[in-house]
Amino acid sequence: MSGVWTVLLLWGCVFLPALSHGALVISQDASTPQGSDGATRLLKKRSTENAEVEMYSVKVNCKVASRFAHTVITSSALNKANSSQEVFFEVDLPKTAFITNFSMEIEGQMYTSEVKEKEKAKKQYEKAVSTGRTAGLVKASGRKMERFSVSVNIAANSNVTFILTYEELLQRKLGQYEIMTRVKPKQLVQHFEIVADIYEPQGIAFLEAYGTFISNELIPLVEKTVTDKKAHISFCPTLDQQRKCPGCDGTLIDGDFFIKYDVNRAETIGDIQIVNGYFVHFFAPPDLPQVPKNVVFVIDRSGSMSGIKLKQTKEAILTILNDLAEDDNFGIVLFDSHISTWKESLTKATKEIVSEAQKFIQGITDLGTTNINDAVMKAVDMIMKGIRDKKVPERSVSMVILLTDGMPNSGESSVPQIQENVRDAMGGNMSLFCLGFGNDVDYSFLDVMSRQNQGLARKIYEGSDATVQLQGFYEEVASPLLSEVDLRYPDNLVNSLTTSHYKQLFNGSEIVVAGRLTDNNLDNFLVEVFAQGFEDDFIVKGQASAQEWDILYPEQEYIFGDYTERLWAYLTIQQLLSKRETGTAEEKGNATALALEMSLQYSFVTSLTSMVVTKPETDEGPEGPLIADKLTEDERQKAHRFGNNVPQLMSNTWTHSSISPTYFVDGDPHFMIELPEQEDALCFNIDDKPGTIFNLVRDQLTGILVNGQTIGDKKVAPDGKVNTYFGRFGIVHQGLGVRLEVTTRDITVSQDGKQAKLFWSDSASLKGTNMDLQVTKDRSLTVTLRDSVRFVVILHKVWKQHPYHQDYLGFYTLDSHLLSPSVHGLLGQFYHGVQFEVRDMHPGKVSEKPDATMLVKGQELTVTRGWQRDFRWDVKNGENIPCWFIHSNGNGLIDGNHTDYIMSGLFKTV
Ligand SMILES: *[C@@H]1O[C@H](CO)[C@@H](O)[C@H](O)[C@H]1NC(C)=O
Ligand SMILES: *[C@@H]1O[C@H](CO)[C@@H](O)[C@H](O)[C@H]1NC(C)=O
Ligand SMILES: *[C@@H]1O[C@H](CO)[C@@H](O)[C@H](O)[C@H]1NC(C)=O
Ligand SMILES: *[C@@H]1O[C@H](CO)[C@@H](O)[C@H](O)[C@H]1NC(C)=O
Ligand SMILES: *[C@@H]1O[C@H](CO)[C@@H](O)[C@H](O)[C@H]1NC(C)=O
Ligand SMILES: *[C@@H]1O[C@H](CO)[C@@H](O)[C@H](O)[C@H]1NC(C)=O
Ligand SMILES: *[C@@H]1O[C@H](CO)[C@@H](O)[C@H](O)[C@H]1NC(C)=O
């Protein structure tokens, strides 16, 4: 048994997915034959040694033809148990990808999926929900990915194969294309492979492939063969090569696999391909000089930016200023409820001026509310004045970069009005780039406003790398090479063209235009590009002719021949979806209709469609359909803010609990607040005399009360430390008239004057209309009370002859979202979230446990990075969860003093 891998296992699987961004997972479920209880599922032992579901094959197969990537993930598992088991399949896929197909093969039978209009699918879904039998499948997962998951019940000794396909157009950023694949099989896999075949007609300039999890020993296993236009990459570690150490079961495969490459750019006109009735044009001319830019940074310094965010923003801006070219002009606008500028007008970015600006930036302090409207207006004025007064070069690109972390709440605060004002003021003469910092921004407001002004928005995630994210974004737009780029094709030969005018082309990016041809047999296809360059107009013309794909590349069976058509469809749908948010009502209507039609025709799961998977019938009756949706930006934002509990995605217990915050107390007693939303956890101990009764949860509105009484060791251990543990819990639901007393020996249930006793020595279940109790022999008790309040009590059996310790209990909250906002208690007060910020990490007393300053509930606390054990999956050993430890009985984190939570009786509220 190794302690190390269990930590990683936990990391990846269910409770802190945000920390790990989960991934390709097939996990088993050792639940009872009824099989639908999420709580029992959580309590199963998640170790690989005795896994009854063996995942024997995981294959990631990616084909890229001219940046269009088609990825198929195939995974097979065998249920070795002699009872049916629930098998999970989870895949993280890039947000920018569309799922196009999903199928399952079970006992030789194929179950397929169908892409349907979202509204229609929803009806089916709601019907299934009303009978309690369904799951929402896609949810947000980290920054770049979203997660597809599905589970099916598999009969004893049966195989299941899952096949998921998704497609995306790789976008060139900072001079390269990136293919990212997340692999976290969580167990050793007999056949594991990642294989990619790339075909790029322009020739491959460079290519690198690596995995975040790939150690020095595994590097030689990443094989790549690059021959002019083709690249073949594979990574196929054997069972033994996957092992963490010789003979152990932990797997090294746990992380992201990246392929990054760029293509040659010999032709200024770019590359034009005409295949199967569609054409695509890739435009990114080499060796162009930068066009000077006029940029105004509009920086939010409202109160919400205080602390780390403002610090990181300053750091980023300082570097960005250094990177300005000497013939760039720039300005700085700061805003909260007031607007101030560094200098009234744009200024040339000479070295002296830049260092003056940097001093100014360093002096920024935070205060006030957020007046976005006036701040952007000010920036627009500065640029327009610069242009009017001819202070900026005639051929220059103008842009406003707005950075904010909040919603407009001062000055003009109507979102549509601000959007209209900004659009009118900018008048197509400059671009707006918006950076939304953190989870409190109204991101879709920024997103729409940027796109209305030929720019784009980017989310900046709170975290230690925020400075890097800010700089990275700036780098992408820092070097405009061309402006007013107009790409022209013969009108009479092309219809259904994607966007062919771009406000600017940035260094390191690429413009892609695709269209459908009216004539399939072209000899000559004239392409022209007009744009404004640094000193001159930029004009290039070129000819292209249709290619018979089969003749040109007869042996390349791996290249899919209809890629130009699918690429065109992908691009068209993306652009239509964007138009839906920025156009007039009629444009929106037309765009929606067309995007929907095309999503259905090409079987893309977009924000307008859902994929309906028909699950096979099992012994326990037919299972409901499963639905996979694509998240909209709004839903993603909500998911980040509230965990993944977006109502329409929250459907069955396991999806729900897998990402929900978790609160528990266990051990000697340590309290743990796991917060996937913040990607972090908080912990504290409460030390007091044995026998003390503490209130853990109390909700007056729903009438729920949980108290716990501590016990001590049998006798004081030689180190003199008096350990306490919880030995008895009292759980009350007043409304239902239910009262439970749980001790290390038995469980007493009282309801309506009747009493029943359950013993830990037997597995048992007690089902009532309002209450469901489930005892797993000598291990755990799951309590589900009507309205989805669910607790688990874990029994820790200690060796009878142990000189000091005795049996004790742990208490875990699995589902508390239906409790009222006034819920309180040592655990209850955190059920509706807790805002905190950690900064200034520094070495602590123990070298491997750094200290830091935590801002929480208006106080500054010194906290220590440590870990505590979570015993849900491994009752014996527990699994380590890193957390911020709050000293002195949670003082400062919990409301009041821990003594305030002491109760006079197990069922008492005072
Ligand atoms: C399979 O079933 C038999 C009896 O039905 C039981 O004795 C045995 O322990 C089971 N094996 C496993 C691996 O569950
Ligand atoms: C979806 O995948 C299944 C299994 O690989 C395949 O049989 C089916 O043809 C695919 N459907 C589409 C539309 O590609
Ligand atoms: C499961 O699939 C594997 C590989 O295809 C095959 O060797 C094995 O016989 C199958 N087992 C069962 C029980 O179908
Ligand atoms: C564009 O980026 C490349 C590296 O990706 C760099 O070598 C080149 O100098 C840049 N050009 C300009 C004008 O910034
Ligand atoms: C944008 O620029 C054009 C040409 O320079 C000018 O005529 C127009 O008034 C400008 N728009 C706004 C809103 O200032
Ligand atoms: C919307 O579609 C209708 C019917 O196809 C067409 O007549 C109309 O011009 C379209 N409107 C816009 C704004 O594209
Ligand atoms: C909490 O209350 C106890 C008893 O009233 C007192 O001794 C202790 O100093 C208090 N602790 C804090 C941190 O206020």
Image (cartoon, rainbow, N blue to C red):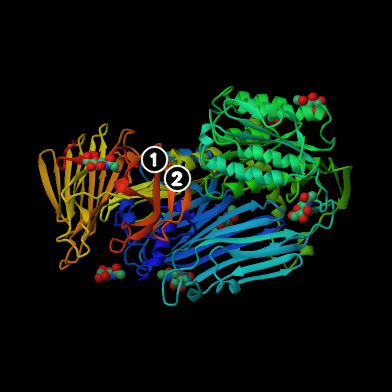
Residue 347 placement, left or right of 849: right
- Coordinates of residue 636 in the picture (x, y in percent): 52, 42
- Coordinates of residue 907 in the picture (x, y in percent): 16, 40
- Coordinates of residue 217 in the picture (x, y in percent): 55, 74
Q: Amino acid at mark 1?
A: Gly
Of residues 662 and 788, the one drawn nearer to the viewer in this rendering: 662
**Secondary structure of residue under mark 1:** loop
Query: What residue is pinned by disc 1?
Result: 833
Q: Amino acid at mark 2?
A: Glu
Depicted 112 relative to depicted 486: above or below:
below
Of residues 835 and 849, the one drawn nearer to the viewer in this rendering: 849
Query: What residue is pinned by disc 2?
Result: 677
Of residues 609 and 365, the one drawn nearer to the viewer in this rendering: 365
Tag 1–tag 2 contact (CB < 8 Å) = yes
Residue 457 figure quarter: top right
Mark 2, Cα crowd under 10 Å, few <14 / some 14-19 / many 20+, is many
**Secondary structure of residue under mark 2:** helix
